[in-house]
Image (spheres, rainbow, N blue to C red):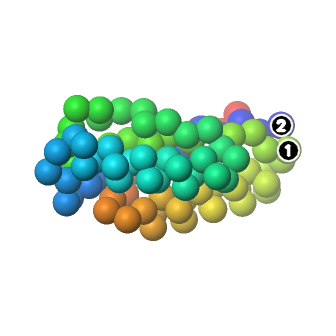
Amino acid sequence: MVVNVSSWELSIPGSRSLKEKRAVLRSLRDRLGRMNVSVVESGLHEARNRGRISVAFLAAHAAQADAILESVDRVVAGARGAVVVGNSTERH
């Protein structure tokens, strides 16, 4: 079994309020949640134009984990209203 935990720091340049930022992050969380991964807003809660999303999942083997992570990364990179400014991954 492979445990994967990945985080993406996002810039949300069009956001003028926390409400607008949370709308962008909620949309992204909903899309990621349909991919059978656990997802959470994991930081930068009070910054109106920055956010952090983290995803965790289990995979049977490293190749499967790589495929899932690639799909998740593609969704995060394509998030409307957000730009990825950093990411990290831990695998155990």
Q: Earlier in the sequence, mark 1 or mark 2?
A: 2
Q: Which mark is residue 60?
A: 1
At a point 79% along the width and 56% down the height, the residue shown is 63
Of the 4 image quadrants, the one containing the C terminus is top right
Q: Is residue 13 visible?
A: yes
Number of numbered discs on residues: 2
Q: Position of residue 90 (x, y in %)?
A: 59, 38
At a point 25% along the width and 43% down the height, the residue shown is 19
Q: Nearer the viewer, residue 64 or 76?
A: 76
Q: Position of residue 61 (x, y in %)?
A: 83, 47
Say which amino acid is labelled 1.
Answer: Ala
Mark 1 and mark 2: Cα distance apart in space? 5 Å
Location of residue 45 by image quarter: top left
Say which amino acid is labelled 2.
Answer: Met
At a point 79% along the width and 44% down the height, the residue shown is 59
Q: Position of residue 78 (x, y in %)?
A: 45, 67
Q: Can you identify the residue that label 2 sits on?
A: 1
Q: Is residue 9 visible?
A: no
> Badge 1, how many Cα within 10 Å: few under 14, some, many 20+?
few
Q: Are marks 1 and 2 in contact (CB under 8 Å)?
A: yes
Of the 4 image quadrants, the one containing the N terminus is top right
Horizontal side of 69 relative to 45 (left or right) equals: right
At a point 22% along the width and 41% down the height, the residue shown is 18
Q: Nearer the viewer, residue 52 or 48?
A: 48
Q: Nearer the viewer, residue 55 or 16?
A: 16
